[in-house]
Amino acid sequence: MTRMTQEEKEQFLADLHVGILGINRTDLGPLTVPIWYSYEPGGELQFITGRKSAKGQLLNVGVRVTLCVQTEDPPYKYVSVEGAIVSMSGEDGEILPMAKRYLGEKLGVAYAEQSNEAESLVVRVLPDNWLAVDYSKAESG
């Protein structure tokens, strides 16, 4: 069996991964792009994007998005979540913690200092549909 419990899914999503975000488009296939994100079990998924970016222009409160995260080495694991955007705001101070999460202290600070935070949106999504597989469980099952 390769199923994850809800607790395992949420913990895996909370771990450090680059996610692939999927957003529907009306005239083309879905836009899929890599993103940095943060998540605390039981809470909202959060990511930052530029207001004028392709994804930033497709997003609005209520729009449903999908995020998939995975391991790169066997035994493979993945979690895919879908949910509606519950808020979008231009909050200051959000880029630095995200940059440090993905780049570490020194590079994170340098990245944040070069970013135009005024042009960024903090997007929050409430995950409500989960898919997951943990192939390490197949080895022991």
Image (cartoon, helix red, strand yellow):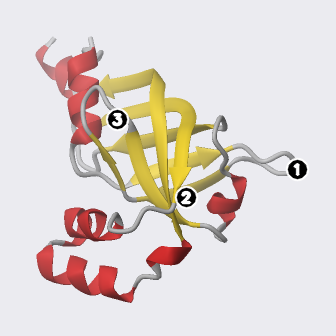
Decide: few, some or many residues near mark 1? Use Cα within 10 Å; few <14, some 14-19, many ≥20.
Answer: few
- Return the disc, 3 or 2, that comes first in the chain's sequence: 2
Q: Nearer the viewer, residue 5 or 64?
A: 64
Asked if residue 6 lies left or right of residue 126, the reply is left
Q: Position of residue 36 (x, y in %)?
A: 38, 59
- Return the disc, 1 or 2, that comes first in the chain's sequence: 1
Q: Which residue bears the numbered disc 2?
A: 33
Q: Secondary structure at mark 2?
A: strand
Q: Which mark is residue 27?
A: 1
Q: CA distance from mark 1 to mark 2?
A: 17 Å
Task: Between label 1 and label 3, give the one nearer the viewer.
Answer: 1
How many discs mark residues in the rendered view? 3
Q: Name the residue type under label 2.
A: Val
Report the residue at 82% width, 51% height from top. 28
Q: Is residue 62 above or below residue 16?
A: above
Asked if residue 47 lies left or right of residue 15, the reply is right
Q: Which mark is residue 77?
A: none
Q: Which residue bears the numbered disc 3?
A: 78
Decide: few, some or many residues near mark 2? Use Cα within 10 Å; few <14, some 14-19, many ≥20.
Answer: few
Q: Quadrant of residue 106?
A: bottom left
Q: Is residue 76 visible?
A: no
Q: Secondary structure at mark 1?
A: loop
